[in-house]
Structure formats: C-alpha cells, structure tokens
Image (tube, rainbow, N blue to C red):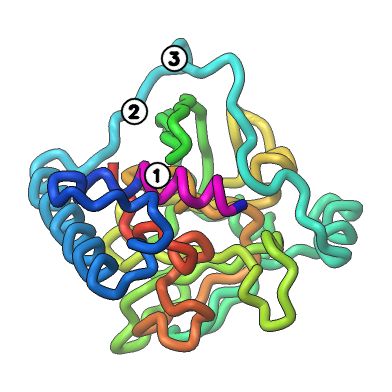
C-alpha cells in the first residue's frame, strides 16, 4: 500500500515539479510547508483549468466505434460488506440512494426512481492516475437534477459521496471510501450518476448499482457503489478533512484533466 501511494503521489504531484520537490517522498508530503505549496498548486490548476474551459466546458465525447475492447475494473471490485452482499442478492431492489445534509427535502431514491428521471448518455475517456485510459459509454441521471429535486439549503458548497466499499478496515470509519466535488462540478452537464455501462446495467466490478461520473477529473474521483450523497459547507469532521479517501492520504482534491 505504501509503495502504491508513493507512486500515486509522485504522479499527481507533477504540477509542482519545477520547485524541485519530489512529492513521491513521504517525508516531504507530510511536511506542512510542502503541503502548503501543493495546495496552492492545486488551487492554481483548478482556477486555470476552469478559465480555459469557459468557452469549451465539456470533456471530449467519442463514438461507439471508439469504445475500448476492455475497460479495466480498478480499485475495489467487490465490497466486503454483508449489507452490500444482501442488496446484490436481491438485484438491488432494496437499495436506496440517500440524499441528505444541507438540503430542503431529503431523498431516498430506488434504482427505478433514478431510471425514471431524465437521463444522459455519454461516451468518454476514463483517465486513471496510474497511467491507463479507456473509453466507455455511460448512461445515468444528471447529478444536478437530483440535487434540484432535493433543493439545496443556503450555504451548501460540496456534495460528498459515501460508498459501500471499505478500502481499509478501521474502527473509526476512516477506511470507508468516499469522495466529494464542489457544486460547479456537481451541476456540470456531464456529471452523472451512472447506472449503465456500454448499454448494460453496471457490473459489480464497475460499481453497481450506481457510480459517479465526473468527466473532467481523474478516475479516483469517480466513486463506485454509491450509497449516500451529503451536501455540506465544509469538510470538517470528515475523517482526514481533505474531502476524500485518497485525498486524506495525500492525493489532490481537485484532479482535473
């Protein structure tokens, strides 16, 4: 695990290579001064990317002829959870997506509820921080429509996604996989809650029954096995306080591509 994290920190830290800092070095990553530089570089990357995208806000979309013959299933491929196993045995009929936190109307949506909402299909490239890419066809409900249905309360700034998989066993829950995006990305037209891949219901290895697709960011932001979305005003109180499982372990929160 430590070697994998070190490699990933190096890859995502390339934006500050000009400073001479090797972000793959654990001692440097854990240094408060270096972390401050990394956070400033991340903010610059996010601001620059959104400025450049002002007139071309969509990630590139492809045709069915471009679909990858294989699409690697990365990360967890079967959540180690009795609750998830029970839901899977029932073909996710009892599964519900909870939307709560800073919303006016908390929601509990079945897969049928989501499929009854307006959908979007997009063929996009998935870019992994580990260096591989694949093109897939995704169908799902735009996240913005779900958030509109719930109604945002004043002060809400981020959508936090809680998942069924526990990446690391921990008594305090810090091993649970979670991610977050801000409301700019949440309401982007290509940010969808996907229940279909390549024309079929999601397979378990790819995040069944529901996963996030946030097409302008790297693959680790595309949380699988979604169970709950919480609207919050900050990341305080969320385990490491960085806004995501990998972010709490040194990744950048904004993983724009």
Location of the C terminus by quadrant is top left
- Above or below 195: residue 42: below
Q: Which mark is residue 66?
A: 3
The magenta stretch is: 2-11
Instruction: Give percent across and percent down for residue 10.
Output: 37, 45
The residue depicted at 41 percent of the width and 31 percent of the height is 124
The numbered mark at residue 218 is: 1
Work out how far the residue at label 2 is from the one at label 1, CA to CA, in angstroms. Answer: 15 Å
Q: Secondary structure at mark 2?
A: loop
Q: Residue at x 34, y 28 (%)?
A: 61
Q: Nearer the viewer, residue 104 or 240?
A: 240
Q: Earlier in the sequence, mark 1 or mark 3?
A: 3
Q: CA distance from mark 1 to mark 3?
A: 19 Å
Query: Farthest front residue?
Result: 27
Would you call the spot at circle 2 few (<14 residues within 10 Å), some (14-19), or many (20 or more)? some
At x 34%, y 47%, the residue is 12
Q: Which residue is mark 2?
A: 61
Mark 2–mark 3 contact, CB under 8 Å? Answer: no
């Amino acid at each position: 695990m430590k070697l994998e994290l070190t490699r990933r920190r190096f890859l995502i830290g390339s934006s500050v290579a000009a400073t001479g800092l090797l972000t793959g070095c654990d001692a440097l990553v854990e240094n408060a001064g270096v972390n401050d530089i990394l956070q400033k570089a991340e903010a610059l990357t996010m601001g620059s990317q959104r400025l450049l995208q002002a007139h071309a806000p969509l990630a590139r979309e492809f045709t069915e002829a471009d679909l990858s013959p294989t699409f690697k299933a990365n990360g967890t491929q079967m959540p180690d959870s009795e609750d998830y196993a029970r839901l899977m045995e029932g073909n996710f009929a009892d599964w519900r997506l909870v939307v709560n936190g800073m919303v006016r109307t908390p929601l509990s949506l079945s897969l049928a509820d989501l499929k009854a909402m307006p959908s979007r299909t997009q063929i996009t490239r998935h870019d992994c921080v580990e260096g591989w890419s694949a093109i897939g066809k995704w169908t799902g409900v735009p996240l913005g429509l779900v958030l509109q249905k719930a109604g945002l309360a004043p002060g809400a700034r981020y959508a936090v996604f809680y998942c069924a998989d526990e990446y690391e066993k921990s008594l305090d829950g810090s091993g649970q996989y979670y991610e977050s995006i801000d409301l700019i990305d949440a309401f982007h037209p290509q940010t969808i809650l996907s229940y279909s891949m390549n024309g079929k219901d999601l397979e378990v290895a790819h995040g069944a029954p529901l996963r996030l697709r946030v097409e302008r960011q790297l693959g680790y932001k595309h949380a699988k096995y979604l169970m709950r979305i919480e609207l919050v005003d900050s990341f305080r109180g969320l385990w490491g306080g960085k806004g995501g499982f990998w972010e709490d372990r040194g990744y950048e929160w904004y993983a724009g591509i």
